[in-house]
Amino acid sequence: MTSARDIRPRQDDLAAQAQYLATSPSASFHSPSSHGSALTRTIPVLNAKHLKPFATQDIKVLLLENVNVAGREILQQQGYQVEFLKSSLPEDQLIEKIRDVHVIGIRSKTKLTERVLKEAKNLIVIGCFCIGTNQVDLQYAAEQGIAVFNSPFSNSRSVAELVIGEIIALARQLGDRSNEMHNGTWNKVSNKCWEIRGKTLGIIGYGHIGAQLSVLAEAMGMSVIFYDVLNLMSLGTARQVETLDQLMAEADFITCHVPELAETKGMIGKPQFEKMKTGSYLINASRGTVVDIPALIDAMRSGRVAGAALDVYPNEPAGNGDYFNNELNEWGNDLRSLKNLILTPHIGGSTEEAQSAIGVEVAQALTRYVNEGTTLGAVNLPEVTLRSLTMDEPNHARVIYIHKNIPGVLRKVNEVIGDHNVDKQMTDSRGDVAYLMADISNVSAAVIKDLYERLESLNSRIMTRILY
Ligand SMILES: NC(=O)c1ccc[n+]([C@@H]2O[C@H](COP(=O)([O-])OP(=O)(O)OC[C@H]3O[C@@H](n4cnc5c(N)ncnc54)[C@H](O)[C@@H]3O)[C@@H](O)[C@H]2O)c1
């Protein structure tokens, strides 16, 4: 075993990078899922002790698919051995490389299947530098004790800004005027073109994106109402309404920001369009299934809806190209023929800032996991954290025991660690996998080795890590 290196993040670097994180102003009071930024939920300890992994060589990191430079730098600054590749790898090459590494960072193209993960004998954590995680076999990873992190909310601000742009563009029919000019037509009109000041914006789903949007819209002189299944604190002077029908009837501009769920499928259909004010507008940058598009086409043809902006569709092509036609969605041509309709190819979250924020958030989650064992934000393991050990606790060690969630396991673990002074301990389970963290005081290197070997020999063991 080679000696471990000092791998603690420098607080000033993290603070500088953190300013790029685009978390919602509302995240602290109503993070709707368990995946809020870990940064918003852990308070750094100033004299935190630099923990080092026991029984691990220098941490090796493999970054594929051109992971953003901001994330790369955070990992390099830890002193990890970082290998960076611009593309994904064919499966056989991936298997060769993954055998060696403790950390892998991917985006959406690299498939981490059971076959690949079986070979990843040293792997402790996967960072998905993107929103989705369906490219990873999450269950298999959990069963091997491999944590998976992603960045579901780093692009919230980008989506909110796009929607603000679309509200003005629809109110002024900018898409049509621009198309006409591209075709050589000068068509200076003011009929049915409006300022947005004083109009009412109705937000459906007041989560990370909806809340950002609320603040921006009010700053531009709009009144904001919102509908959400949760009872939420309004930002500014926004007002929560009790029913979707109420929102549909009151708002001049309606924008959808709900997740894709069975309950949100076709949530905006014929009955909802019939509730809308004549001449109002609809925006959907959430998921394609939320709006019934044939019903929207009818509502636009009848004049009920004066304009719409769509960024998402029930079927979306896998790559860029000439694909937005009737073969993809049977109403594609009807949709494209409508006036004052802005169509964008799922670019709501696609900005340089969002990529950078994703890089920072995932890299920080990875370093926290490697250095401290904190699983806050993990998508496949229970979320467990303990406050950092401090310099005043020099002979402490942190035991992390990932194990099968079977009866009697805690008794056996406590038989191993119970002879020592356990300062603090936390455990939680998710399905068949449980995660235990315990800080033990006054331990020597020999004791740590003994603890490690005894925990490794338990039949409930999935993975043991000791940091000291
Ligand atoms: N266009 C893009 O590029 C892009 C980028 C990021 C996110 N998104 C999508 O935007 C949507 C919102 O994202 P977010 O980060 O704000 O999510 P979020 O989880 O922070 O917020 C969603 C909100 O919707 C509410 N909600 C859930 N079901 C509802 C229902 N039936 N009726 C009313 N409210 C309901 C929740 O309570 C929550 O407050 C998601 O569908 C996400 O996939 C799109």
Image (spheres, rainbow, N blue to C red):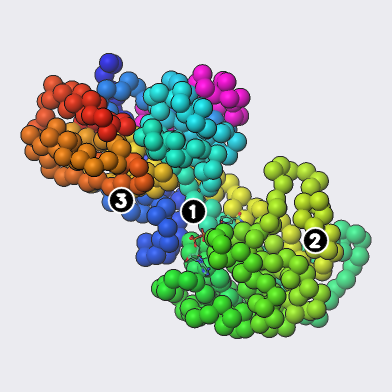
| Amino acid tagged 3 | Thr
| Amino acid tagged 2 | Trp
Q: According to the image, label 1 marks what residue?
A: 153
The mark nearer the N terminus, 1 or 3, is: 3
Q: Name the mark on residue 172.
A: none
Q: Is residue 391 above or below residue 260?
A: above
Q: Residue 79 sits in which quadrant? A: top left
**Where in the figure is residue 124, as x and y percent of width and height?**
38, 31
Q: According to the image, label 3 marks what residue?
A: 42
Q: According to the image, label 2 marks what residue?
A: 331
Q: Which residues are magenta?
A: 74-97
| Label 1, ligand 1: CB separation under 8 Å | yes
- Crowding around mark 3 (Cα neighbors within 10 Å: few <14, some 14 to 19, many 20+) is some
Secondary structure of residue under mark 3: loop
Mark 1 touches mark 3? (CB < 8 Å):
no
Q: Residue at 64%, 67% (x, y): give it.
A: 266
Looking at the picture, tell me which residue is in the foreground, 16 or 401: 401
Q: Residue at 22%, 46% (x, y): give it.
A: 426
